[in-house]
Image (tube, grey):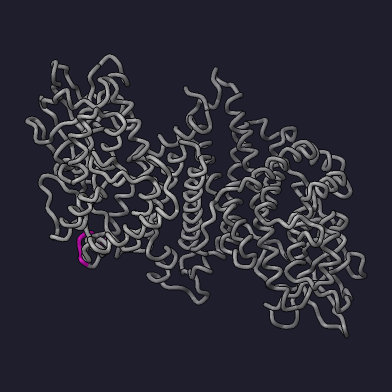
Amino acid sequence: MDRTFFMPLILTEEQAMLRDSARAFLAEQAPVSQLRALRDSADPDGFSHTLWQGFAEMGFTGVLVPESHGGLGLGPVEAGVVMDGIGHQLCASPLLASSLVAVTALRQAGSAAQQQHWLPLLASAQAIATLAVDEGRKHTAQQFSTRATPQGEGWQLDGAKTLVLDGHVADVLIVAARVGDDPARTGLFLVSPQTPGVTVERTVMVDAHNAARVQLDAVQLGADAVLGTVEAGGPALAAALNVGRAAVAAELLGLADEVFDRTVQYLKDRRQFGKRIGEFQALQHRAAHLYTELQISHAASLKAQQALERDVTGATDAVALAKARAGQTATLAVQEAVQMHGGMGMTDALELGFFMKRARVLQELWGDSHFHLDALAQRQGY
Amino acid sequence: MSTVTADTTAQLAEFRRETRAWLQAHCPAEMRQPMTSEDDVCWGGRHAQFSSPAQRQWLQVMAAQGWTVPTWPQAYGGAGLNAEQAQILAQEMRALGCRSPLNSFGIWMLGPALLQFGTEDQKREHLPPIARGEIRWCQGYSEPNAGSDLASLATRAEDRGDHFIVNGQKIWTSYANHADWIFCLVRTDAAHKHTGISFVLFDMASPGVSTQPIVLISGKSPFCETFFDNVRVEKRNLVGPQGGGWDVAKYLLGHERAMIGSIGDREAAKPIGQQAADALGLDASGRLRDPLLRAQLAQFACDEAAFRLAMQRAADLGRAQQAHPAMPSMLKYYGAELNKRRWELMMAIGGSDALEWESDRSGHGHVARTWLRTKANSIEGGTSEVQLNVIAKRILELPNV
């Protein structure tokens, strides 16, 4: 890690103000009950269009888009602040997939014309873009079976993708594919879901957030389908995944904080055996331990955001640390939350279950803790 | 804490120049080498044994500058530096590799207590000899029956008018067998637990004082048992009011916890994963052969890196005045547990080589002794269980029983 990087590990005043206004907005516009309603009504789009437009008006959808393309021109710390707020309320929306990850891929690899076309649409929530990366049940390093074969002036895409966030509502898929025989050579391809050969199967997930499987059968694309150049694909994907992982870490910790706060309050309210259960030392110690883990993971998360701000391609270790820690801490937090709420914690009526389910998906997304710990160890030479 | 006015940038730059020049002129070359053994540490005292003329000289010139205690007022042997100047001095010393001229519980613990609670006479009597390294102090707090529950201490001080008569026993007194004076918590009122405690000072050479070193599971240690058999303590050596000793102790405990919490922060020469790779070798895929050990190392490295960031963040929050005052408890808790994990892993990496206890090859059992010594990290300075209690009560505001 960069030893000369001495920015204080705290939010600036502006970032703290954004955090407060984002939290207030989200608590009012998109409490957890909204996710419950989307789930119970089997909403076909899986998110509230009203909320999505509200995100655009607040500037969230343009947080990473340069001002010249209609965005706020802010960075990963501001994105993290918004994601933290989303974690507290479990707001389902295409923000992560489209506004953060897809935008990053476009900014890193897209040609001037591609950026000119897509960034304003994404920033204003007029279009949704999403990455199609994973191919099996576990996230792996860039080694794709999905192939892009040159076909005349254009390309043919063949393969299958899993866990494509917001895949069934996206206007454009950014598909990662191997180009040629070198497994390390990755290109990113802009694919309209309407293209013949593209099949998008919406998968209803445990966390009631959008995801899809995408099948690509002899999909014919023009020469301009490549995002920028083939050579730009690998680094752009790496940058986009890092931005996504850092954002996921922020959402995980916002979620963990929310269930922790609710649990501590429950310890103070719930009476059994003539006492508030928070008087029992066993519970006090577990709560204090969890608090400690949360504070430590928060430090790693902010560090990753700051590292990405400095260098979006060079922050891989910091991001891996944040994602690994956030996944583990959130897993502990939701586990303790359900346990300490007793029988009520197991009811669907209580909201804790939604948090536990969302945490599990986020832990899996773009590499779980094992993936990132292993990657860190490999890069450390053991 | 600035004293009078904040210095300008130009004044501070000038101070840095002067400081650097003085250090270069006065710090002996030998005192710029890293310390390699216990002998390199200078504790001072009436019976001080300097490992070399250079070590004695370094103490003397720094004491004359007031730089053994740079932020103390000049009247008490310090240099009256403000916070920025003190930081500059520390930076310049670090840059030149200058050793600390003096280790002293008098500086770290008693000094702050006297500055806060002492009378003018007490400050003038005791602080300058501390600053000059002439008097070496030890701390008399814990007793065999008063550890975590320190306030239940029973060493009795009977009020005899102009003096006390002290009877009892202390334990875990570091370097008591080398100390000249002791600052001690004693019970002046058996009827009231906290308000019956007083903070007194007395000479370890007083009749009735004896010490016994304690051998730990890790071998020799600086810890001692200290016995008091009708020891006379003059009333003028009472610090703070009679019955006000617990307030003094609480004030000092904050300092001690902050010190021990930095245990987990010592940066190893090589990351532990690389140490394992060097010692145990890698398989064809470039990974340690033992996947379970590898996983534990990876988890430890992750938690340690995150903990360092949390320490940095706590310091940044402190400077921005956003830190919770009970933060040190959180850091001490996690840092101590982390250190124990580190040395469990070091033993695993060391295998049977690390099991040697006395050979030169094993550095006189360095790895095994350190592994054992770290088991105290979660006990000393407030046990992990006590730290969790503090977090639960003061930060989470969970109810008292």
Q: Identify the residue shown where x is 37% and y is 40%.
A: B3
Residue B223: horizontal and vertical position, in percent? 21, 43
State the image quarter where residue A128 is shown.
bottom right
Residue B180: horizontal and vertical position, in percent? 14, 40
State the image quarter where residue B144 is shown.
top left
Residue B228 in sight in this render: yes
Residue B167: horizontal and vertical position, in percent? 15, 25
**Which range of residues does the magenta coloring cover?**
B356-360
Question: Foreground residue, A176 or A25?
Answer: A25
Question: Foreground residue, B80 or B239?
Answer: B80
As drawn, B232 above or below B173: above
Q: Residue furthest left?
A: B207
As drawn, B46 above or below B182: below
Is residue A119 covered in magenta?
no
Question: Foreground residue, B176 or B86?
Answer: B86
Residue A354 in sight in this render: no
Image quarter where the N terminus of chain B lies is: top left
Residue B17: horizontal and vertical position, in percent? 35, 60
Q: Residue furthest top?
A: B191
Drawn side of residue B295 relative to residue B266, left or right: right
Drawn side of residue A126 relative to residue B135, left or right: right
Q: How many marks?
A: 0
Q: Identify the residue shown where x is 54% and y is 41%.
A: A290
Q: Please name the predominant secondary structure of the magenta segment in the image.
A: loop
Q: Identify the residue shown where x is 87% and y is 47%.
A: A49
